[in-house]
């Protein structure tokens, strides 16, 4: 991930958000799918950086017109650092549970480290997500950004492989923080997340175009 530019990271996030949004959508004669085991290891991309979701072993398939809430109590998770706390507590698996896990992955992509990195565990046993939320509330979230993404160049010598647009980062960080809200009711839908990520990409691409123009 460290070798990827901010634009490339955004495009990967958009691919994944688009896939989750599709799985969550209710369509006639098609089951809605809740993955239930989202973490960084369930995402992959090809040589063209087209991202995809993998491993549906624990996915839940809901028939059309069925309530999107299902009791799915599990005691073992591959990584507790990605698990929706409300799902873990009540056993109620919803689309918003996927949104939470995806939010953790968004922060991983932003920070360039896994959710269980020891530097985060030294601050909180809950890992990255708790540290990120605290920093977001304190206004210090920018300190957690992958240093590679904070490299700056002058506008005339702008290199798209370095630096990230400030508005793009803020849009990304805001929606990532919304995804990891403590309760399911306060999280956005994947459709909203997808639109915000597209907005973040527009900010970044516009910066590149402007710098090339000048």
Image (cartoon, rainbow, N blue to C red):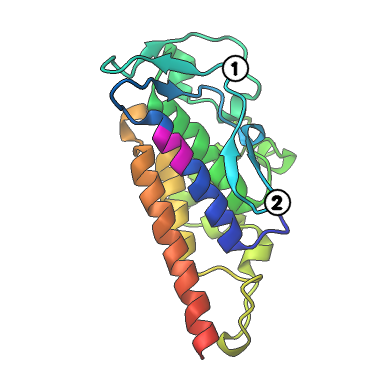
Q: Is residue 18 above or below residue 210?
A: above
Q: Are marks 2 and 1 in contact (CB under 8 Å)?
A: no
State the separation of the CA atoms marked 2 and 1.
25 Å
Query: Residue 160: x percent and y percent?
Result: 61, 73
Q: Is residue 75 above or below residue 145?
A: above
Point out the tag, 2 or 1, that comes first from the N-terminus: 2
Q: Secondary structure at mark 1?
A: loop
At x 34% / y 37%, what residue is drawn? 189
Q: Nearer the viewer, mark 2 or mark 1?
A: 2
152 left or right, relative to 98: right
Residue where numbered disc 2 is placed = 47
Residue 158 numbered tag: none
Query: Residue 95: x percent and y percent?
Result: 39, 27
At x 42% / y 39%, what residue is drawn? 179
Residue where numbered disc 1 is placed = 57
Q: Which residues are magenta?
A: 18-22
Residue 167 seen in the current view:
no
Q: Main secondary structure of the magenta part?
A: helix
At x 32% / y 35%, what residue is drawn? 186
Residue furthest to the front in view is 29
Residues packed near mark 2 inside 10 Å, few (<14), some (14 to 19) or many (20 plus): few
Query: Residue 133: x percent and y percent?
Result: 49, 43
At x 56% / y 46%, what residue is drawn? 107
Q: Quadrant of residue 126?
A: top right
Residue 67 seen in the current view:
yes
Query: Residue 41: x percent and y percent?
Result: 67, 33
């Amino acid at each position: 991930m460290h070798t990827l530019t901010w634009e490339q990271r955004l495009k990967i996030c958009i691919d994944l958000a688009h896939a989750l949004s599709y799985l969550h959508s209710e369509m006639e004669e098609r089951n809605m799918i809740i993955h239930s085991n989202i973490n960084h290891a369930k995402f992959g991309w090809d040589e063209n950086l087209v991202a995809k979701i993998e491993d549906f072993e624990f996915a839940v398939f809901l028939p059309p017109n069925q309530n999107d809430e299902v009791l799915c109590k599990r005691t073992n998770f591959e990584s507790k650092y990605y698990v929706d706390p409300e799902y873990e507590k009540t056993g109620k698996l919803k689309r918003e549970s996927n949104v939470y896990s995806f939010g953790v992955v968004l922060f991983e992509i932003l920070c360039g480290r896994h959710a269980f990195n020891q530097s985060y565990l030294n601050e909180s046993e809950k890992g990255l997500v708790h540290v990120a939320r605290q920093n977001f509330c304190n206004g210090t979230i920018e300190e957690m950004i992958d240093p590679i993404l904070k490299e700056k160049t002058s506008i005339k010598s702008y290199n798209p492989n370095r630096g990230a647009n400030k508005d793009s980062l803020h849009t990304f960080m805001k929606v990532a923080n919304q995804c990891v809200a403590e309760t399911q009711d306060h999280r956005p839908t994947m459709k909203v997340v997808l639109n915000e990520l597209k907005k973040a990409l527009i900010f970044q691409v516009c910066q590149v175009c402007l710098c090339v123009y000048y």
